[in-house]
Amino acid sequence: MGEIRDWRPFVYGGVASITAEFGTFPIDTTKTRLQIQGQKIDQSFAELRYRGMTDAFIKISKQEGINALYSGIWPAVLRQATYGTIKFGTYYTLKKVATERGWLLDKAGNENLWCNAGCATVAGAVSSAIANPTDVLKVRMQVSGKGTNNAGLVRCFKEIYVYEGVRGLWRGVGPTAQRAAVIAAVELPVYDFCKLHLMETFGDQVANHFISSFIASLGSAVASTPIDVIRLQLHNPGGGGGGVGAATVPPPSVTPPPSTVGSGHHHKFYTGSLDCAIQTVRNEGFRALYKGFVPTWVRMGPWNIIFFITYEQLKQMY
């Protein structure tokens, strides 16, 4: 029975992640559109079409239909089924191992912050690297929009594979893993810390889970937004790629930059994560690294609240 129980964090993490994804995906789509716009080096996305989160939400709904807000939902669900399952299952498993070996808790029963953060970092980086292809699919479909009927999951996967090869599915894996590691290293220890210290006031109840997850989401949004901006620009077809190579031909569903039309070549705008960060700051200013911060936090808040409440309820039920 003990062996079966060891699998429960993995199952709970996957189910709770998928639930949270469905509830907050339209916010994620507006965040992606806000972060990808304004790339002066890539004329396809140089125009500032949206003034903010609300404006993006309204324009996407009116111009492309409600379905466009859910473009990329299925790779996102697939991602959470893999990423969420591995991340949270690995995190709580590593914490259990660290506790058994006396690394996590001190004599007073308090958790060691660095050990906790280390468990979260490993869980976030490993799970994100494994699930990277689903993240690439999600971003491509969100950027192209037009609803799931015109840019389905299978078609998008086929285009990436045909025009960019297997490496295209791991485009931007470096910054993606870095982002996941940063988010996990901040979000999970902060949640556990807040939950523990609010236990006397609220107990192990929904109010505690709500407050703890909300605080955790703010910290992770501040830490991860610059990495998220870089990651999205590398995932975008013109971005180049995080050490995994550039595409040679633009996918048909995404309009290539004017400079590449008719040339038969797909330009590689960035040589890697650092180059992307430098060029973004140079061309658009430091604030460009925080494009989409508000929708990032607005999404992370509800996402974490839905996730942790669902996760905690599953723990209590089974």
Image (cartoon, grey):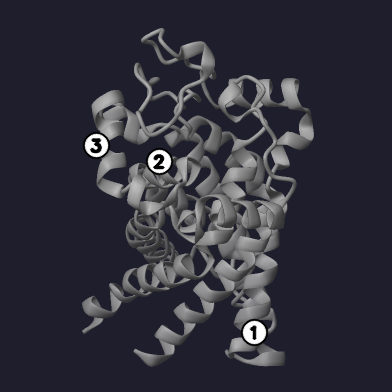
What SS does tag 2 mark? helix
Determine whether, in the image, residue 272 is placed left or right of residue 200: left
Asked whether the viewer can see residue 116, the reply is no
Quarter of the C terminus within the rendering: bottom left
Q: Name the residue that disc number 1 marks.
A: 208
Residue drawn at point x = 55 percent, y = 32 percent: 233
For residue 158, the mark is 3
Between 166 and 89, the residue placed more toward the observer is: 166
Label 1 – label 3 distance at C-alpha:
45 Å
Q: Is residue 52 above or below residue 20?
A: above
Q: Name the residue that disc number 2 marks.
A: 136
Label 2 – label 3 distance at C-alpha:
13 Å
Determine whether, in the image, residue 304 is placed left or right of residue 174: right
Quarter of the N terminus within the rendering: bottom left
Between discs 2 and 1, the one toward the N terminus: 2
Between 164 and 230, the residue placed more toward the observer is: 164
What SS does tag 3 mark? helix
Residue drawn at point x = 34 percent, y = 42 percent: 133
Between 172 and 22, the residue placed more toward the observer is: 22
